[in-house]
Amino acid sequence: MIKDNFDDEIKALEFLDFAVSFGRPPIPFTGEWVDKNALLKELRRNFVKQSAPYHVLSKAYEADFGNDLLLKDIGKDTEEMIPTWVVVPSEEAMGMSPSAYCDKVQAAGVKALILFPSSTGNPAKATRYAFTRWFYGDYFEEFERREIPITVEFSPNRRDEPDWPKLYGVAKEFPKLQIVLGDGFQRTAWTLIRLLRECANLYVQTSGLDVHRELEYMVEKVGPQRFLAGSKFPVSTIGTMIGEVLFSNLTFEQKKLIAGDNARRIMHLPITKKGEN
């Protein structure tokens, strides 16, 4: 008999969607503006326990402007929605020293940062800064010292790839900085496996692993601790993220790590242990 309700199984995995956003994505077919209520409605409909949203205008317009809108939108719902700020790692861009910026991050309850160093997919939407140590070094040193994880998204075209040498370089330069690769990338499993083996501080967001059984294959090669569930809603659907994890041929413990506990660990959030629910 085919089961038609998986609500309890989804709830037990305690998903934390590491890749969602507020605002109107710069893609014609997505249409409407996504505010907190719309995002919460969709997350709850899919039984996603938590999320880590950023604001689209932080990327498409100006980082601080969108970051402020994000905090205003989230308000007191910080247990269900953990704010993520977009950062351009430069004193000129952020208007303050790395230390002062990280003080601001932590005071605001922000648990993760996201960077968009380039965009071959749509150069008009790119932040377009040099992704190299002489530009980001002081900021990354402070992120590493404060244990603030970062997501790096190069925003490639469908058939392009992330900038592997730059990603490898920053992971080796800052070995204690937790770095999540958040691109939409296809058919790069062998490169990712080698990269994850070389760099213990690198993680991969599941939204890019859309080849049949790719997530399971990579977990077999490098373990479940290196993957974070992310839907990229509203550009993509939350159900796709859930199905990829829920219906994989992995153990419950492996699925739960990927669904949310790996993200909670790097963001220093509480993790529910088996039997505590």
Image: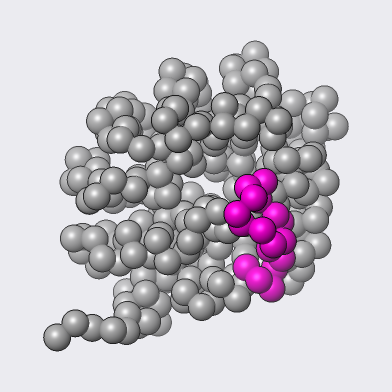
State which region is magenta.
22-39
Above or below, 261 against 149 in this view is: below
Above or below, 173 against 103 in this view is: above
Q: Is residue 11 left or right of residue 216?
A: right
Q: Is residue 79 left or right of residue 88?
A: left
**Who's the residue at 54% across and 71% down the image?**
43
- The quadrant of the rendering that contains the C terminus is bottom left
The reply to whether residue 102 is visible in this rendering is no
**Who's the residue at 80% across and 56% down the image?**
69
**Image spot of residue 183 (x, y percent):** 48, 39
- The quadrant of the rendering that contains the N terminus is bottom left
Above or below, 133 against 222 in this view is: above
**Who's the residue at 44% across and 27% down the image?**
160
The reply to whether residue 68 is visible in this rendering is yes
Residue at the extreme front of the image, as rendered: 29
Q: Is residue 159 magenta?
A: no
Residue at the extreme left of the image, as rendered: 1
Above or below, 176 against 252 in this view is: above
Q: Quadrant of residue 78?
A: bottom right
Q: Quadrant of residue 275?
A: bottom left
Residue at the extreme top of the image, as rendered: 134
**101 and 250: which is toward the camera:** 250
**Who's the residue at 36% across and 37% down the image?**
186
Q: Quadrant of residue 131?
A: top right
**116 and 224: which is toward the camera:** 116
